[in-house]
Amino acid sequence: MNALRAARVATFTYFALNGFLLGLWLVHIPTVEQRTGISHAELGRLLLLLGLGAFIGMRIGGRITDRVGVKLVVPLAGVLCSVTAVLPGLATNQWTLGGALLLFGIGNGLIDVSMNAHAVVVERHYKRPVMSAFHATWSLGGVAAALTGARTLSWELSPAITLAVAGALGIVVSLVTARALLNEKEEHHAVQQTGKRKVPRRIWVMAALAGMVMLSEGAANDWSVLHLQDILDASPEIAALGYGAFATTMTAGRLLADRITAKAGPMAVLRWGSAIGAAGILTAALSPWIWLALVGWAIAGAGLSGTVPQLFSAAGHAEPGAAAANVSRVAGLGYLGVLAGPAVIGWMTHIMPLNIAFLLPVVFCVATAFAAGVLRTESAEERVSA
């Protein structure tokens, strides 16, 4: 049990590290943009390379992790992510920044898949839901990055120095923490003898649901502040509370979601969480008052908080020996949803008001609620196999 507890703490550490490294880059985006002399439009295009790299890293990481085991891949992914996190701070023009973001994306995608696969292993040994807490730790890592970045920027430290220190720390943490990881290599080797198998259809259903839910999250993250400013004429200070309300309840919800999942089941968390998320976004979109819109964004964050971890967990438990590959499929399509959300909403604002464009994530959340039964099928099969 001590070894299992240590493995859980190690998983928390890698989630926090990933959230911290990615968050530290996000904090320095304006500074890097100014240093490289690129426009907002050019930055938007270059950020797609970060997403492309993450998608590539997830697909490659899924196959490698299932082949050699999580104990080897997770720390190496942590080191790669830490090293590549330094590169955007060293960029001097759009070409070097584009290459840096592509490599950083690959490192981020690799650690994302491998640490989620290890989280599945830990959850399997605990025999109770623990996945949502890991995702909450990722969010807390982002909060720590925001506070750290604010302080180092106030000291007028360059992004290169800050990211280099963070990267060096990440390398040390990745290597030191590795000894506590569990080893799934023997289990995978036994399963791999069955030969090549077709990916179950329910995995692609989960991937589609992840894409829709994470698109809704991305829309809330990137457009809630502008919604309050442009539609409800809120001041910049008040408008910032829109994202704050969503992010706060999202993190708090993930800290509580495991207990709720243990009592109500993953299907109920996905179904009712998506429904509550839809209600929250709809309330924010149609509200004529700033205070009610803030309440709506808070409700949306609370509802959506536990949905993605249920999909990742279910994908990881679907096939022994293929946990990472299945997680990479669900996470990969989900990540595309995060990237596509802001762009799709932005395109829709050319033909309709921003608050009406929010009806798209509302529809996606409702569709996810209706399709949540895919997790009931998974749970039933797990009980039979057990």
Image: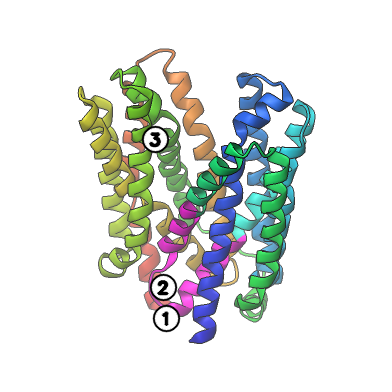
Q: Which residue is mark 1?
A: 386
Q: Residues within 10 Å of mark 2 (few under 14, many from 20)?
A: some
Q: Main secondary structure of the magenta part?
A: helix
Residue 121 visible (yes or no): no
User: Is 124 within the magenta?
Assistant: yes
- State the CA–CA distance, disc 3 to disc 1: 39 Å
Q: Quadrant of the C terminus?
A: bottom left
Q: Which residue is mark 2?
A: 382
The residue tagged with tag 3: helix, strand or loop?
helix
- State the CA–CA distance, disc 2 to disc 3: 34 Å
Residue 130 visible (yes or no): yes
Nearer to me, 71 or 361: 71
Residue at 75% across, 42% down:
87
Q: Are marks 1 and 2 in contact (CB under 8 Å)?
A: yes
Residue 220's disc is 3
Span highlighted in magenta in the image? 114-140
The residue tagged with tag 1: helix, strand or loop?
loop
Of label 3 and label 1, which has the lower sequence position?
A: 3
- State the CA–CA distance, disc 1 to disc 2: 6 Å
| Residue 193 placement, left or right of 91 | left
Residue at 63% across, 75% down:
188
Which amino acid, by three-letter code, is at mark 3? Ala
| Residue 212 placement, left or right of 296 | right
| Residue 208: x %, y % from top left | 46, 45
